[in-house]
Amino acid sequence: MATLLARTGRHRQRYVDQFRLVAGCIPYKLEKNVEDQGSNVEDRVLVLMISTPKRDDLVFPKGGWEDDETLDEAACRESIEEAGVKGLLDENPLGVWEFRSKSSQNSCTLAGGCRGYMFGLQVTEELDHWPGQASYSRKWLTIEEALEHCRYDWMRDALKQFLTSLSRRKDLGRRSDLAEIRMIPVSKNRGGGCNAVTKLLGKTIRGPAP
């Protein structure tokens, strides 16, 4: 069996307007013992989160979008590298969020800013071994538990958007073909000063795709 290796370094990393472009997933599955179609979606869905050493809070798999892959390829790669899962990626991203990297939380410049595209990923396979296994452990949670333990506010917002999106779907629990996702254009942000940067980062800049 071939060994899966995680990508390292940022020499192929995409940037737009000084923002590092990031792709990630909210991996999910339907509980098999909950078959009542009339029940709330929130009661039927489990989401997968990952933890890092010496931290009690959790995150969803995400990472840099590189220049030799499409947006959906980057999101699927991160789900394999960090969470060890494969599945069916939603056709459209849940939205786009701007936030700071861990090392630049107190910065007043755009340096260290990230622009993250998050997708829902219906899990079809959990790998026994994956590239990030030594650094990440994975845990299936209810929506309520995930909201409580989520490390970042922007990820919590993405989870709420995921739940809203899932509630609107008529084919919940059925597989569909993957569709290629085009690169989503992002608007050029203007403004200056620490206050302007603080207001810009950490907020959704694009709503859910139609």
Image (cartoon, rainbow, N blue to C red):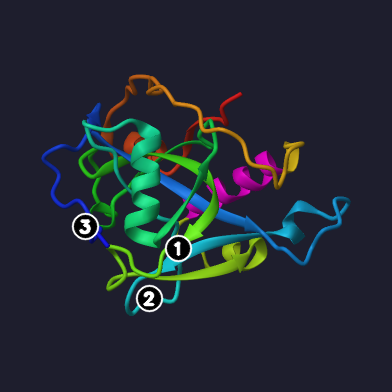
- 58 above or below 63? below
Q: Do the residues bearing badges 2 and 1 touch, measured as CB atoms within 8 Å?
A: yes
| Disc 3 residue type (three-letter) | Leu
The numbered mark at residue 55 is 2
Q: Magenta-highlighted stretch: main secondary structure?
A: helix
Query: Which residue is more in the foreground, 104 or 165?
Result: 165
- Is residue 141 covered in magenta? no
For residue 190, what is the image quadrant?
top left
Q: At which x and y percent is residue 184? A: 41, 23
Secondary element under disc 2, as helix, strand or loop, is: loop
Residue under the image location 32 percent in, 56 percent down: 81
Of labels 2 and 1, earlier in sequence is: 2
Q: Nearer the viewer, residue 36 or 195?
A: 36
**Nearer the camera: disc 3 or disc 2:** 3
Tell me, yes or no, whether the two marked residues, 3 and 2, touch with CB atoms within 8 Å: no
* Foreground: disc 1 or disc 3: 3
N-terminal label among 3 and 2: 3
